Image (cartoon, rainbow, N blue to C red):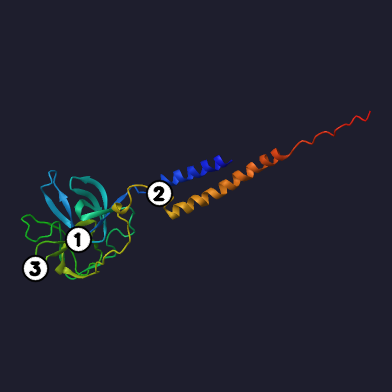
Amino acid sequence: MKYLITFVISMLIFCSYNRPAVCLSATSYARVLAPTNILRLSSNDETKDIICIAEKSYFVEILSERDAYYKVNYNGISGYIKKNDVKEILQIPKTPYPTQINIVIGSDCNLRSTPTTRSSVSNIINVVNNGETNIEFIGRVFAEEAIDFGGTTWYYVKFNGEYGYIYNKYVKTITPIYENTELTTFKSEVPQTPQNPISHIPSLLLIIIMAVPIIAILFILYLPNRAHKKIKTPKPPKIVDRY
């Protein structure tokens, strides 16, 4: 009996010791450590057109790897981001990208394919009318100062199913972009070797909780056999020959 109990406890310890530390999702995300560019890359990595900025504290979904870059999804667009500018996490974030960023246009303007008004070829995609609010914010980028003293900020947006840039001076109001305070765990913070359950109190308690009912069941099953062994067959009465 004691050998059986020892075996059961040993198996529980073994299973606990060799369990995975964290259940990983097939979808992988990385946190943006500082405002960094989402890029378009050519086949030889020489062309690095900036699509928009990935905001600090938000996330990118990793699609694949390419040398020093990750191919990522950010707020519905795909591009490349430097590996050194992000850090992989274990969870799937609840708010991976800036949301509910409302833009209101203050005067008629153009939606452009590139953040410049000086393109040699027309880059106008669509016309956006004054007061328009049906604009989905994707990101921002620093580029040409299209109007003197107007700054260099452009907004990369989705309007009527088309992606393009709007110069900030034509924007009447935009919702502030606050940092994402969502708590996550970086992959590098997870121990690479499994923890010893004997020195890890939660694991040890789990082993005890799992072992107690098993030992009780084995004891109950074993008890009748022990009781049966203790019953002795009565000896026949001794016959005394008086003659």
Amino acid type, mark 2: Asn
User: Closest to the observer: 134 or 144?
Assistant: 144
Query: Residue 158 is drawn in which quadrant?
Result: bottom left
- Could you tell me which secondary element the residue under label 2 belongs to? loop
Amino acid type, mark 3: Ile
Q: CA distance from mark 2 to mark 3?
A: 64 Å
Q: Quadrant of the C terminus?
A: top right
Of the image marks 1 and 3, the number of the one nearer the N terminus: 1
Image side of residue 62 versus residue 48, left or right: right
Q: Which residue is mark 2?
A: 196
Q: Label for residue 35?
A: 1
Of the image marks 2 and 3, the number of the one nearer the N terminus: 3
Pinpoint residue 74: horizontal percent, then vertical percent.
25, 55
Pinpoint residue 140: horizontal percent, then vertical percent.
18, 62
User: Closest to the observer: 108 or 103?
Assistant: 103
Pinpoint residue 3: horizontal percent, then vertical percent.
55, 40
Amino acid type, mark 1: Pro
User: Closest to the observer: 32 or 170?
Assistant: 32
Q: Looking at this rendering, what residue extends furthest in the front direction?
A: 243
Image side of residue 236 versus residue 125, left or right: right
Q: Which residue is mark 3?
A: 147
Pinpoint residue 56: horizontal percent, then vertical percent.
23, 61
Q: CA distance from mark 1 to mark 3?
A: 25 Å
Compared to residue 174, the image places residue 124 above or below, namely above
- Could you tell me which secondary element the residue under label 1 belongs to? loop
Q: Specify few, some or many for label 3: CA neighbours under 10 Å numbering under 14, 14-19, or 20 or more.
A: few
Foreground tag (2 vs 3): 2
Q: Name the residue at 34% across, 47% down.
A: 193
Is residue 82 at all visible to an observer of this figure?
A: no
